[in-house]
Amino acid sequence: MSRPRKPDNVKLISSLFSPDKGIIEKVISQLSEIYGPADWISPEIFFDRTRYYAKEMGWPLHRRFVSFEDLISPETLVEVKLRTNEIENEYLSQGNRLINIDPGCISAERLILATGKNYIHRVYLNKGIYADLTFIFKRGSFRPLEWTYRDYSDPETIEYFNELRKNYMKKLREIRRID
């Protein structure tokens, strides 16, 4: 019989993209006020793997990934996604978003993104939010899955998340020594 136990806290991350680099910077500051200091912000990345968002948001789109120093309980990912949706709504122009914010979390085993869209590989969490299994950690690296977004499957992006996982694992070891 399995015995339920509390999971480890996870590392909060987010992808932000917008046609306006200034909005990305403002939103990273907003997120840092809510979730604690950012401990890593990616270099600017040209978001060019899809034109899916161009009609709504404009073109070109700029992206940054961000991670936060403070670990969170995994079940709070639902509330994080609902809050980032509210922030997106603060940056509307004629009903269109000027920023897309996709929060997620890194654990030892996986990277999960939060989404409001159901699909075959997504598991319902609560309040209209689903967990999108984006990467699994296997043989020393995150591995994309058949449904992983192409931009996340980029080797450079995977390396970013591998580094964030290393930092997360180091922090977990420190927490366990203290406890």
Image (cartoon, grey):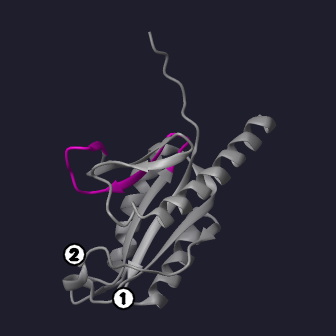
Quarter placement of the C terminus? top right
> Does the magenta run of residues contain 162?
no
Res. 173 image quadrant:
top right
Residue 88 against residue 151 in the figure, above or below = below
Callout 1: few (<14), some (14-19), or many (20+) C-alpha neighbours within 10 Å? some
Residue 142 position (above or below residue 21): above
Q: Residue furthest top?
A: 1
Residue 76, percent from left and from top: 46, 49
On the question of residue 127 being in view, the answer is: no
Q: Amino acid at mark 1?
A: Pro
Residue corresponding to mark 1: 19
Q: Nearer the viewer, mark 2 or mark 1?
A: 2
Q: Secondary structure at mark 1?
A: loop
Structural crowding at the residue carrying mark 2, measured as other residues with C-alpha within 10 Å and reported as few (<14), some (14–19) or many (≥20): few
Q: Which residue is mark 2?
A: 52
| Residue at 26%, 74% in the rendered image | 50
Specify the segment rendered in magenta: 106-125
